[in-house]
Image (tube, rainbow, N blue to C red):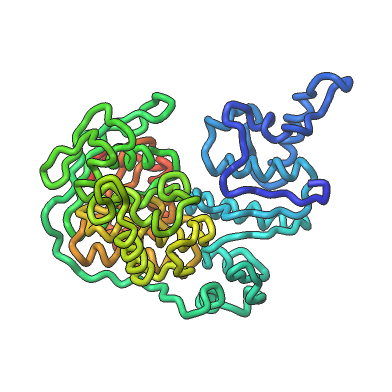
Amino acid sequence: INLKIGMVHQHFMLVPPLTVTENIILGMEPKKNNIFIDMEKAIKKVEELSESMGFKIDPKAKIENISVGIQQRVEIIKVLYRGAEILVMDEPTAVLTPQEIEELFEILRSLKKQGKTIIFITHKLNEVKALSDRVTVMRKGKVVGVKDTKDTNQEEIASMMVGRKVIFEIEKKPLNFGKTALKVEKLKAFNSKGLPAVKNISFEIKEGEILGFAGVEGNGQTELVEVITGLRPASSGKIFLYDQDITNYSPRNIREDKIAHIPEDRRRRGIISNYTVAENLILGSHYRSPFNKGLALNFTAINNHANNLIKDFDIRPSDKDNLLKSLSGGNQQKVIVARELCGEPKLLIAAQPTRGLDVGSIEFVHQQILNERDKGKAILLISADLEEILSLSDRIAVIYEGEIVDVLDPKKTDENEIGLLMTGSTTNKKLSKAK
């Protein structure tokens, strides 16, 4: 920051119990008589900075009580308060609605007019075209191309990113849905603070169907997935897999019943980074045949299994003995996808399956999800990426404050309508009905 460079991280660096002003001035508090914090002066400065960017913000509001979009504005004001002339934005739209994204772009354009330099890091190519003047493409840690944005297109940028042509259009086969695979009835659950997070939710997913859940992060999606996968207890309601009641099953029993789970936080819930690729590929199955033979592991079976999956899912580098932490994020995700799909699941739960991945890895993961759909598997897709939700889903359930507010046909809706529903900006609520 002494060099006037400020960073706005993808995961915000804010203290939830503190106010907007307290977060902004933290570590650089203005003093009164060189002793006390001059809060009046600080609040005035925050108001001046926000007004200079064309919006107002409540300087006394607590971070935990404001939306994600407003929190991001606080992060921007925080670096401007410290005198930043260069702003580095890391995946800044990852958790924003379409409306919030457009508001962010207006703020960044305003900062550009004020002479600020903005480095905008993203894998969303439409945002590159919409906002940037120049685009730098990196692959495997090296710069592989620099272009004036007006002289290039999304296809060329994607090709530079992965070293080959990327298919953007997703083709879904028309399918006749089968039997109901997953049925959730009036499900309720609390979050880690003991507050209601899942509120009377009901829905069904049939064989060969992808039900997408769209919502701003923190509206109950995480808790919903945790309840279904046995990681969090349901306070009431029922979950059925092919008419079998699996409510409050343990994670092991959930896996035994062939429910596959691609977790939203792969580092915390999906992998053990200090284990090898081969070891990660048997997590959750390590106690079963053929990987376990009584008191010892069957390393011949484990190695053969790993080599087959590395080949089938194109995991790179292809050495089964590599520690997982040495792999790229895209290849770590391939390990998770390979492990979860190799057991022929009845139900696939994919939570934020392409978060932080390059376009090539995104293309791969999307194709694997569609392959499972085409096999007649039921799929629950949770994603903050509305383009992903619209292109993959057969139906879209919009979740807001722990409730389903509407269920949409992806062919008859768009990002704008979904974005409004995600923020509760509609009175057309169809609470908890996704049938």
Residue 337 image point, x, y percent: 36, 59
Q: Residue sitting at 59 percent across and 78 percent down?
A: 152
Residue 281 image point, x, y percent: 36, 57
Residue 18 image point, x, y percent: 62, 27
Q: Residue sitting at 43 percent across and 42 percent down?
A: 423
Number of marks present in the image shown: 0
Looking at the picture, tell me which residue is in the foreground, 232 or 214. 232
Looking at the picture, tell me which residue is in the foreground, 103 or 183. 183
Q: Is residue 293 left or right of residue 362?
A: left
Residue lying at the far right of the rendered structure: 33
Is residue 70 among what the camera can see?
A: yes
Is residue 209 among what the camera can see?
A: no
Residue 270 image point, x, y percent: 41, 49
Q: Residue sitting at 24 percent across and 56 percent down?
A: 290
Q: Is residue 348 left or right of residue 366?
A: left
Residue lying at the far front of the rendered structure: 295
Q: Is residue 252 above or below residue 181?
A: above
Q: Residue sitting at 57 percent across and 61 percent down?
A: 122
Q: Is residue 297 above or below residue 235?
A: below
